Amino acid sequence: MKLRLPLYGKILLMFLINVLVLALVCYVVLRMQFGSGLRTALGRVAADRIQSVAEDLHGRLDAADGVERQDILKQVGAAYAMSVNLMRPPNQVLLGEELQLPAAVREEMRSMGGGPRRGGPPPPPRERLFGDEGPLGEMFSGLDDERGPPGRMPARMGTFMVEARDHTYRHWVGVVLPPLSGIERSAGPMFLLFASNSVTGNGLFFDLKPWLWGIFGAMALSALLWLPLVRGITSSVRETMRATSQISKGRFDVRVNESRGDELGELGRSVNQMAVQLDGYVRGQKRFMGDVAHELCSPIARMEVGLGILESRVAESDLARLDEVRAELRELSVMVNELLSFSKTTLAGNEKPLETVALVDVVRQAAHREGLDADELSGPIPAGMKVRAQPEPLQRAIANVLRNALTHAPESPAIEVEVEKQGNKVLLTIADHGPGVPEESIARLFEPFYRVDASRTRETGGTGLGLAIVKTCVEACGGTVQARNREGGGLEIQIELIAAV
């Protein structure tokens, strides 16, 4: 089954996909940082942040004693949910937990002056000390016009990032620290190592909050910019859908706003033109049917008079044939009268104002019109139930429904009539216990001249206009009508009317 989404839902879905793509791109960029180190712009921002944290931590460690230093590292590790250690290459732990360093981390430490390089001789001892001479001494004195007070770490110097896929901790960041008081300087440089399984270091390596706020802020601004366009498109489409739905039900007076200057405005104008033309065609057709029916009344009347005169002059052997002719003429007269009623109700139904009428009185009058006693209708109608309608068309609609039930279910139990109020609507349901109709015929029951039995024999009765007249009469009262088969058998006609206040 194909999933159907409204236009607004599709736009929102694309918006969410856009957000997810941006989030995925951000994640990939962060993962790539450990492959490209600190050479990119984002890496330099991360290096500055790590240097700042390491400088602050160095000051706190230098002012504390041995036990306090251990507690400080534990506090920092707990705050960022990571391992924090102060070490000397290759695996000497000065402060922190005992752990085996990944080969990639040891290689980075060697390359920064923390031991012999792979494939080459160790550097001279003087270059491995913290002083004013050698690479590390120059690092902490300041290089490339980034000089500062002695012992202060310059930005983006002495920091590395490594990803170790085969270790307990996957992401490593190291910072070269100046010597702490009480720790021997000549043993080599110290490295402050942060190890985490999170690519962001839980906010230490990369603080995602500003980036996320920026991204979602931009997306929110985009949504605000899109909102008028999306709302205009969807509201125009919904209005056009409602209008075409009403047109399909025969309400050609509906109109669509055509003030837009784009394709949707053109669509609205086309729908309005179509409604006007269809209204003209349908009205012309119904007026033609009414005129034809009206013109047929006079010949039918003359034929009835002629049959009355002829009856007194024919032999008794021919009276049976004469009765057959009279029956055919009466059936033709009934069809012509129904045509007149259908045409009259359709063309002039909406011209009369609606009145407040008691529904129980209208139902009783309709039942009496069809020769039924109100007691034969199962289900009481509340005496105080009132609706807004035209009394005569509503009575004719209910009478036609009752007649249809009697015709197709003559031997069934009493006809069921139920009334229910739902908000400002009143639902009048009339159901029989007959055979019902095929499901494929339900949608066409209210079409003029449509009959479930295509043979149109006299035994099946009807002209196919009864329920079409019901529809036009109910719509003249500002209501709607629909039909459905009952689960236990039979046909159910539901009329929705406007409740009187």
Image (cartoon, grey):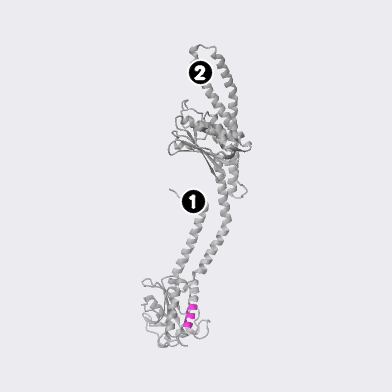
- Mark 1 and mark 2 lie on one chain; the one further toward the N terminus is 1
Q: Is residue 442 above or below residue 73?
A: above
Residue kind at label 1, given as amino acid type: Leu
Instruction: Name the residue tied to disc 1.
Output: 5
**Residue nearest the viewer, comparing 135 with 370:** 370
Query: Is 118 drawn above or below residue 276 in the view shown?
Result: below
By secondary structure, the bulk of the magenta-drawn segment is best described as: helix
Please tell me which residue is depicted at 49% across the width and 74% down the height of the picture: 44
The kind of residue tagged 2 is Asp
Q: Position of residue 213 (x, y in %)?
A: 53, 66
Badge 2: few (under 14), some or many (20 or more) residues near its Cα, within 10 Å?
A: few
Mark 2 highlights which residue?
323
Nearer the observer, 321 or 206? 321
Q: Can residue 122 be seen by looking at this rendering?
A: yes
Where is residue 486 drawn, in percent x and y?
45, 38
The one nearer the camera, 116 or 233, is 233
Label 1 secondary element? loop
CA distance for labels 1 and 2: 63 Å
Q: How many marks?
A: 2
Counting from the top left corner in percent of width and height, residue 359 is at 57, 37
Residue 169 placement (x, y as % from top left):
39, 73
Residue at point 59% right, 24% down?
Answer: 297
- The answer to whether residue 59 is magenta is yes
Q: Which residues are magenta?
A: 51-60
Q: Say whether residue 138 is magenta.
A: no
Q: Where on the picture, by quarter, is residue 438?
A: top left
